[in-house]
Image (cartoon, grey):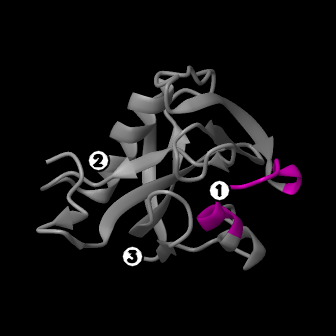
Amino acid sequence: MENDSRISGVRHPQVAVAVFVLKSSSILLGLRLSAVGHGTFALPGGRLEFGETWEDCAAREVKEETGMDVSRVETLTVVNDVIRHGPNPTHFVTIIVRAELVDVGQAPANMEPDKCGGWAWYEWSQLPDPLFEPLGDLVRGGFDPFSASRLV
């Protein structure tokens, strides 16, 4: 089923993983082209598949979206995001992780040009605007993926 959030006409929360891919003092962000968050900058990530670990989901999503391989995936926090406005309201419980590049020489490729306007590295102290609402909430709340301790 493509969208499990509407079973029998009832909306249900979905589970996703968002990945802070770290490189020196920068993070990887892509420009969203989807209806939810269109024109905002977001982390790579996506829905958790049945039976998949958070770490495997993070590695799969980064590979599918950027072509890059990551390792040392660590769970940092969990957020509960309900986006009520827009054409397609959503509710995601998102596991926030950080990961390191397997090879720091890897460059991100835009593997899903219908969903993303491109990937780029941004210094943590100079993030682009506007950020995808859930990411913006984290940043405004003082979250720092470089100093955050592991959740589990």
In this view, 53 is above or below 63: below
Who comes first in sequence, dot 2 or dot 3?
2
Location of the C terminus (image quadrant): bottom left
Please, what is the three-letter code of the amino acid marked with disc 3? Val
**Callout 3 environment at 10 Å: few (<14), some (14 to 19), or many (20+)?**
few
- Name the element at disc 2: helix
**Callout 1 environment at 10 Å: few (<14), some (14 to 19), or many (20+)?**
many
- Name the element at disc 1: loop
Which residue in the structure is indicated by mark 1?
Answer: 132
Q: Residue at x 49, y 73 (%)?
A: 81
- Name the element at disc 3: loop
Q: Residue at x 29, y 47 (%)?
A: 56
Residue 130 position, x and y percent, is: 78, 53
How far apart, in angstroms, are the residues tagged by discs 1 and 3?
25 Å
Residue range highlighted in magenta: 125-136
Residue 57 position, x and y percent, is: 31, 48
Q: Nearer the viewer, residue 139 or 21?
A: 139
How far apart, in angstroms, are the residues tagged by discs 1 and 2?
23 Å
Who comes first in sequence, dot 1 or dot 3?
1
How far apart, in angstroms, are the residues tagged by discs 2 and 3?
16 Å
**Callout 2 environment at 10 Å: few (<14), some (14 to 19), or many (20+)?**
some
In this view, 128 is above or below 7: above
Q: Please indicate, yes or no, whether residue 99 appears anywhere in the rendered image.
A: yes
Task: Count numbered badges in the picture.
Answer: 3
Q: Residue at x 24, y 52 (%)?
A: 3
Please, what is the three-letter code of the amino acid marked with disc 1? Phe
Q: Image quarter for residue 14?
A: bottom left
Which residue in the structure is indicated by mark 2?
Answer: 56
Which residue in the structure is indicated by mark 3?
Answer: 152
Please, what is the three-letter code of the amino acid marked with disc 2? Asp
